[in-house]
Image: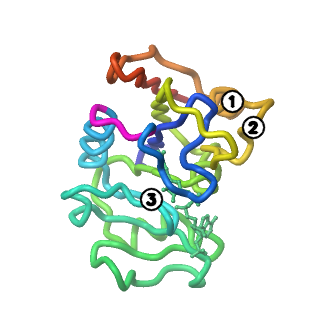
Protein backbone atom coordinates (compact mmCIF):
# COMPACT_ATOMS: atom_id res chain seq x y z
CA UNK A 1 0.00 0.00 0.00
CA UNK A 2 1.32 3.43 -0.92
CA UNK A 3 0.67 6.53 1.17
CA UNK A 4 -1.18 9.24 -0.73
CA UNK A 5 0.11 12.75 -0.10
CA UNK A 6 -1.02 16.11 -1.50
CA UNK A 7 1.21 19.15 -2.07
CA UNK A 8 0.05 22.68 -2.78
CA UNK A 9 0.79 26.34 -2.17
CA UNK A 10 -2.29 28.55 -1.87
CA UNK A 11 -3.02 32.24 -1.49
CA UNK A 12 -4.74 33.67 1.58
CA UNK A 13 -8.04 33.13 -0.21
CA UNK A 14 -7.28 29.48 -1.03
CA UNK A 15 -6.33 29.88 -4.72
CA UNK A 16 -3.66 27.95 -6.66
CA UNK A 17 -3.62 30.08 -9.82
CA UNK A 18 -5.26 33.12 -11.38
CA UNK A 19 -8.36 33.09 -13.57
CA UNK A 20 -6.24 32.11 -16.61
CA UNK A 21 -4.57 29.18 -14.84
CA UNK A 22 -1.27 31.06 -14.42
CA UNK A 23 0.60 30.84 -11.12
CA UNK A 24 1.36 34.45 -10.07
CA UNK A 25 4.78 35.41 -8.68
CA UNK A 26 3.14 36.00 -5.30
CA UNK A 27 2.71 32.20 -5.01
CA UNK A 28 6.30 31.38 -5.96
CA UNK A 29 8.73 30.91 -3.09
CA UNK A 30 12.16 29.24 -3.03
CA UNK A 31 11.75 27.64 0.40
CA UNK A 32 8.42 26.15 -0.60
CA UNK A 33 9.92 24.92 -3.89
CA UNK A 34 12.79 23.25 -1.99
CA UNK A 35 10.31 21.48 0.30
CA UNK A 36 8.11 20.49 -2.67
CA UNK A 37 10.92 19.25 -4.93
CA UNK A 38 12.70 17.26 -2.20
CA UNK A 39 9.37 15.68 -1.21
CA UNK A 40 8.73 14.68 -4.83
CA UNK A 41 12.21 13.11 -4.97
CA UNK A 42 10.99 10.64 -2.32
CA UNK A 43 7.71 9.89 -4.10
CA UNK A 44 7.19 6.68 -6.08
CA UNK A 45 4.89 8.46 -8.54
CA UNK A 46 3.71 12.04 -9.16
CA UNK A 47 0.07 12.49 -10.20
CA UNK A 48 -1.34 15.61 -11.86
CA UNK A 49 -3.79 16.95 -14.43
CA UNK A 50 -2.81 17.80 -17.98
CA UNK A 51 -2.23 21.49 -17.19
CA UNK A 52 0.00 21.00 -14.14
CA UNK A 53 3.66 20.04 -13.76
CA UNK A 54 6.21 20.53 -10.99
CA UNK A 55 9.01 21.67 -13.32
CA UNK A 56 12.62 21.73 -12.20
CA UNK A 57 15.72 19.80 -13.34
CA UNK A 58 14.75 16.48 -11.69
CA UNK A 59 11.22 16.24 -13.12
CA UNK A 60 12.19 13.99 -16.05
CA UNK A 61 13.43 11.27 -13.67
CA UNK A 62 10.11 10.97 -11.86
CA UNK A 63 7.42 8.45 -12.78
CA UNK A 64 4.07 10.13 -13.31
CA UNK A 65 0.41 9.69 -14.15
CA UNK A 66 -1.12 12.58 -16.11
CA UNK A 67 -4.90 12.81 -15.94
CA UNK A 68 -6.76 13.42 -19.18
CA UNK A 69 -10.11 12.53 -20.69
CA UNK A 70 -8.53 12.29 -24.16
CA UNK A 71 -7.88 8.56 -23.72
CA UNK A 72 -10.10 5.76 -22.37
CA UNK A 73 -7.96 4.36 -19.55
CA UNK A 74 -4.15 4.23 -19.70
CA UNK A 75 -1.87 5.15 -22.61
CA UNK A 76 1.78 6.01 -23.25
CA UNK A 77 2.60 9.71 -22.80
CA UNK A 78 4.05 10.93 -26.11
CA UNK A 79 5.82 13.79 -24.29
CA UNK A 80 7.55 11.89 -21.47
CA UNK A 81 9.03 8.35 -21.32
CA UNK A 82 8.53 7.91 -17.53
CA UNK A 83 4.90 8.92 -17.71
CA UNK A 84 1.50 7.43 -18.56
CA UNK A 85 -1.69 9.26 -19.51
CA UNK A 86 -4.52 8.20 -17.19
CA UNK A 87 -8.30 8.49 -17.32
CA UNK A 88 -9.62 7.36 -13.91
CA UNK A 89 -13.00 6.53 -15.46
CA UNK A 90 -11.37 3.62 -17.28
CA UNK A 91 -8.56 2.52 -14.95
CA UNK A 92 -8.00 2.63 -11.20
CA UNK A 93 -5.04 4.35 -9.56
CA UNK A 94 -3.71 0.91 -8.63
CA UNK A 95 -3.86 -0.22 -12.28
CA UNK A 96 -1.95 2.93 -13.24
CA UNK A 97 0.73 2.28 -10.62
CA UNK A 98 1.11 -1.32 -11.75
CA UNK A 99 1.42 -0.28 -15.40
CA UNK A 100 4.08 2.28 -14.45
CA UNK A 101 6.05 -0.23 -12.39
CA UNK A 102 5.90 2.06 -9.36
CA UNK A 103 8.50 1.36 -6.68
CA UNK A 104 8.21 1.97 -2.95
CA UNK A 105 7.26 5.37 -1.66
CA UNK A 106 4.30 7.69 -1.45
CA UNK A 107 2.10 8.83 -4.31
CA UNK A 108 2.35 12.63 -4.61
CA UNK A 109 -0.79 14.43 -5.81
CA UNK A 110 0.12 17.89 -7.14
CA UNK A 111 -3.06 19.30 -8.69
CA UNK A 112 -4.87 21.09 -10.12
CA UNK A 113 -8.30 21.75 -8.66
CA UNK A 114 -10.21 18.71 -9.85
CA UNK A 115 -7.33 16.33 -9.18
CA UNK A 116 -6.78 17.65 -5.63
CA UNK A 117 -10.55 17.30 -5.03
CA UNK A 118 -10.76 13.78 -6.42
CA UNK A 119 -8.35 12.43 -3.80
CA UNK A 120 -9.94 14.11 -0.74
CA UNK A 121 -11.23 10.84 0.68
CA UNK A 122 -7.87 9.10 0.12
CA UNK A 123 -5.17 11.47 1.41
CA UNK A 124 -3.02 10.12 4.23
CA UNK A 125 -1.41 13.57 4.39
CA UNK A 126 -2.02 16.90 2.70
CA UNK A 127 0.77 19.49 2.77
CA UNK A 128 -0.86 22.93 2.67
CA UNK A 129 1.60 25.77 2.13
CA UNK A 130 0.18 29.27 2.31
CA UNK A 131 1.56 32.59 1.04
CA UNK A 132 0.17 35.16 3.46
CA UNK A 133 0.84 38.09 1.13
CA UNK A 134 -0.87 36.56 -1.91
CA UNK A 135 -4.53 37.21 -2.70
CA UNK A 136 -6.08 36.03 -6.00
CA UNK A 137 -9.70 37.15 -6.31
CA UNK A 138 -11.49 35.14 -8.99
CA UNK A 139 -8.66 32.60 -9.14
CA UNK A 140 -8.67 28.79 -9.31
CA UNK A 141 -9.35 27.23 -5.89
CA UNK A 142 -7.34 24.33 -4.48
CA UNK A 143 -10.54 22.29 -4.09
CA UNK A 144 -13.80 22.77 -6.01
CA UNK A 145 -15.63 23.31 -2.69
CA UNK A 146 -13.42 26.28 -1.67
CA UNK A 147 -15.24 29.62 -1.83
CA UNK A 148 -16.59 32.46 0.30
CA UNK A 149 -18.07 29.99 2.78
CA UNK A 150 -15.41 27.28 2.79
CA UNK A 151 -11.64 27.56 3.26
CA UNK A 152 -9.17 24.82 2.26
CA UNK A 153 -8.92 24.00 5.98
CA UNK A 154 -12.71 23.57 6.20
CA UNK A 155 -12.63 21.14 3.28
CA UNK A 156 -9.72 19.11 4.68
CA UNK A 157 -11.38 18.90 8.12
CA UNK A 158 -14.69 17.85 6.52
CA UNK A 159 -12.83 14.93 4.92
CA UNK A 160 -11.39 13.68 8.20
CA UNK A 161 -7.93 15.26 8.11
CA UNK A 162 -6.38 16.96 11.16
CA UNK A 163 -3.81 19.77 11.15
CA UNK A 164 -0.28 19.42 12.49
CA UNK A 165 1.74 22.37 13.78
CA UNK A 166 2.26 25.39 11.53
CA UNK A 167 5.86 25.73 10.32
CA UNK A 168 7.47 28.84 8.91
CA UNK A 169 9.00 27.93 5.54
CA UNK A 170 10.01 31.55 4.88
CA UNK A 171 9.07 33.90 7.71
CA UNK A 172 10.13 37.04 5.84
CA UNK A 173 7.87 36.17 2.90
CA UNK A 174 5.01 34.99 5.12
CA UNK A 175 5.07 31.43 3.73
CA UNK A 176 3.94 28.72 6.14
CA UNK A 177 3.30 24.96 5.93
CA UNK A 178 0.75 22.84 7.76
CA UNK A 179 0.66 19.09 7.15
CA UNK A 180 -2.81 17.64 7.59
CA UNK A 181 -2.91 13.94 8.49
CA UNK A 182 -5.70 11.39 8.53
N1 LIG B 1 -0.26 26.64 -6.51
C1 LIG B 1 -0.08 25.35 -6.69
O1 LIG B 1 0.49 24.66 -5.81
C2 LIG B 1 -0.58 24.69 -7.95
C3 LIG B 1 -0.73 23.29 -7.99
C4 LIG B 1 -1.20 22.71 -9.16
C5 LIG B 1 -1.53 23.49 -10.25
N2 LIG B 1 -1.38 24.82 -10.18
C6 LIG B 1 -1.77 25.67 -11.33
O2 LIG B 1 -3.15 25.64 -11.42
C7 LIG B 1 -3.49 25.71 -12.80
C8 LIG B 1 -4.88 25.22 -12.95
O3 LIG B 1 -4.95 23.84 -12.81
P1 LIG B 1 -6.18 23.08 -13.47
O4 LIG B 1 -7.06 22.63 -12.36
O5 LIG B 1 -6.79 23.87 -14.57
O6 LIG B 1 -5.38 21.97 -14.24
P2 LIG B 1 -4.99 20.45 -14.14
O7 LIG B 1 -5.78 19.66 -13.15
O8 LIG B 1 -3.54 20.33 -14.11
O9 LIG B 1 -5.46 20.04 -15.59
C9 LIG B 1 -6.81 19.97 -15.94
C10 LIG B 1 -6.92 18.88 -16.98
O10 LIG B 1 -6.59 17.62 -16.36
C11 LIG B 1 -7.46 16.62 -16.85
N3 LIG B 1 -8.30 16.15 -15.75
C12 LIG B 1 -8.57 16.79 -14.58
N4 LIG B 1 -9.39 16.03 -13.83
C13 LIG B 1 -9.61 14.90 -14.53
C14 LIG B 1 -10.37 13.71 -14.27
N5 LIG B 1 -11.08 13.55 -13.15
N6 LIG B 1 -10.38 12.75 -15.20
C15 LIG B 1 -9.66 12.87 -16.34
N7 LIG B 1 -8.93 13.96 -16.65
C16 LIG B 1 -8.92 14.95 -15.75
C17 LIG B 1 -8.26 17.25 -17.97
O11 LIG B 1 -7.46 17.11 -19.12
P3 LIG B 1 -8.06 17.00 -20.61
O12 LIG B 1 -8.52 18.38 -20.97
O13 LIG B 1 -6.90 16.52 -21.42
O14 LIG B 1 -9.18 15.99 -20.57
C18 LIG B 1 -8.31 18.71 -17.53
O15 LIG B 1 -8.53 19.62 -18.62
C19 LIG B 1 -2.41 24.92 -13.50
O16 LIG B 1 -2.27 25.41 -14.80
C20 LIG B 1 -1.20 25.20 -12.65
O17 LIG B 1 -0.47 26.28 -13.22
C21 LIG B 1 -0.92 25.44 -9.06
Looking at the rendering, the stretch of residues picked out in magenta corresponds to 27-31
Where is 35 relative to 47, above or below?
above
Within 10 angstroms of label 2, few (less than 14), some, or many (20 or more) residues? some
* CA distance separating discs 2 and 3: 24 Å
Q: Is residue 140 left or right of residue 95?
A: right
> Where does residue 94 sit, x and y in percent of width and height?
48, 63
Task: Identify the element where label 2 is drawn.
Answer: loop
Identify the disc placed on residue 151: 1
Task: State which quarter of the image contains the C terminus.
Answer: top right
Task: Identify the element where label 1 is drawn.
Answer: loop
Q: Is residue 115 left or right of residue 6?
A: right
Where is 93 relative to 41, above or below?
below
> Where does residue 160 sit, x and y in percent of width and height?
65, 29
The residue at the far right in this view is 149
Q: Which residue is tagged 2? A: 147
Chief secondary structure of the magenta span?
helix
Amino acid sequence: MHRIEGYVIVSVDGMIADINGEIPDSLRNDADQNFFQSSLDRAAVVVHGRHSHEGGPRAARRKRLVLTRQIADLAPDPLRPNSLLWNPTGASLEEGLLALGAGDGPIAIIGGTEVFSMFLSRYDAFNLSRAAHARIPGGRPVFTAVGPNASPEDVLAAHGLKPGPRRDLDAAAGVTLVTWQR
